[in-house]
Amino acid sequence: MRKLYVIGIGAGDPDQVTVQAVKAMRQVETFFVIGKGEAKRELVDVRTAILAEHMDRPYRIVPIADPPRDRTPADYLDVVDDWHDRRSAVLESAFAAADGVGGILVWGDPALYDSTLRMIERVLARGVVSFDYEVVPGITSAQALAARHRIVLHGIGEPVRITTGRRLREEGLGAENALVMLDGDCSFTAIPDADVHIWWGAYLGMPDETLIEGPLAEVGEQIVRRRAELRDRKGWIMDIYLLRRGR
Ligand SMILES: C[S@@+](CC[C@H](N)C(=O)[O-])C[C@H]1O[C@@H](n2cnc3c(N)ncnc32)[C@H](O)[C@@H]1O
């Protein structure tokens, strides 16, 4: 492989694929698709549907089995580091076996809570394979959430913190607007809810898209219940929310 495109494909709505992404996809001969087990099957299907719609010439899909992540309690960063190492080794062999131009389709944008770029740097640092690579930005789930709720992510001139559920629990909300991703535990329930507003969205851009918005004290429990129902029904869920003091 001489060149690799890392292409953001938007957060689930196939219409969020940009013209730039389509142009890059059409250069690609081999797509590497990183699988995440049956629960995430639908996410892989979104990628293959995007390719079927936009590609104008033959291409190969090489599935990459994602090595399991060690879930036993240990230092979080060490666990992630070890997992990234194992993922890089798997990617390295796939890259070594491919000719020409490769591509990886990344959910949302590669710059936001995604390890693809770090893994590619690791593969290159190992020195076994070498190639040029280019990043094509995509619409993030943060943008999809804001658009669906028709909101600005912050008050005039204010900052917005993009964070994870785990860190929201550890650090609290503070005075800022917080956009929370990767939260399997409804961490907003740990935030004193007086005067906090929430804009929540699940499966944004997908057929099961669900939106709830309101004062946290009024809609917090409803979100917890709805999220559990949706997850039980589909077997997986992806959700994101904005928290703001006042409104
Ligand atoms: C591993 S991160 C990837 C983020 C992605 N790179 C992006 O730009 O949005 C996965 C998290 O993104 C959020 N997410 C991604 N797609 C989503 C969607 N369609 N609906 C709701 N949340 C989504 C969820 O918070 C999920 O836990």
Image (tube, rainbow, N blue to C red):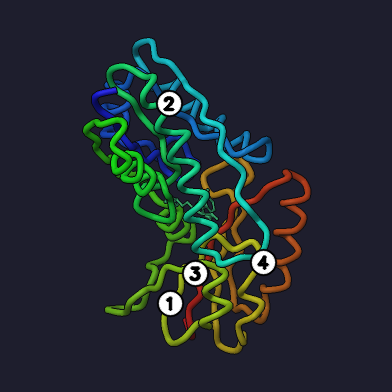
Q: What is the spatial separation of the Cα atoms under label 1 and label 3, in whole angstroms?
A: 7 Å
- Per the image, label 3 sits on a secondary structure element best described as strand
Closer to the eye: label 3 or 2: 2
- Per the image, label 2 sits on a secondary structure element best described as helix
Q: Tell me which numbered mark, 1 or 4, is placed earlier along the sequence.
A: 1
Q: Tell me which numbered mark, 2 or 4, is placed earlier along the sequence.
A: 2
Residue at 65% across, 37% down: 37
Q: Tell me which numbered mark, 3 or 2, is placed earlier along the sequence.
A: 2
Few, some or many residues within 10 Å of mark 2 (<14, 14–19, 20+): some
Q: Are marks 1 and 3 in contact (CB under 8 Å)?
A: yes
Task: Specify the amino acid type for callout 2.
Answer: Ala
- Per the image, label 4 sits on a secondary structure element best described as loop
Residue pointed to by mark 1: 177
Q: Are marks 3 and 2 in contact (CB under 8 Å)?
A: no
Residue pointed to by mark 2: 94
Residue pointed to by mark 3: 242
Closer to the eye: label 4 or 3: 4
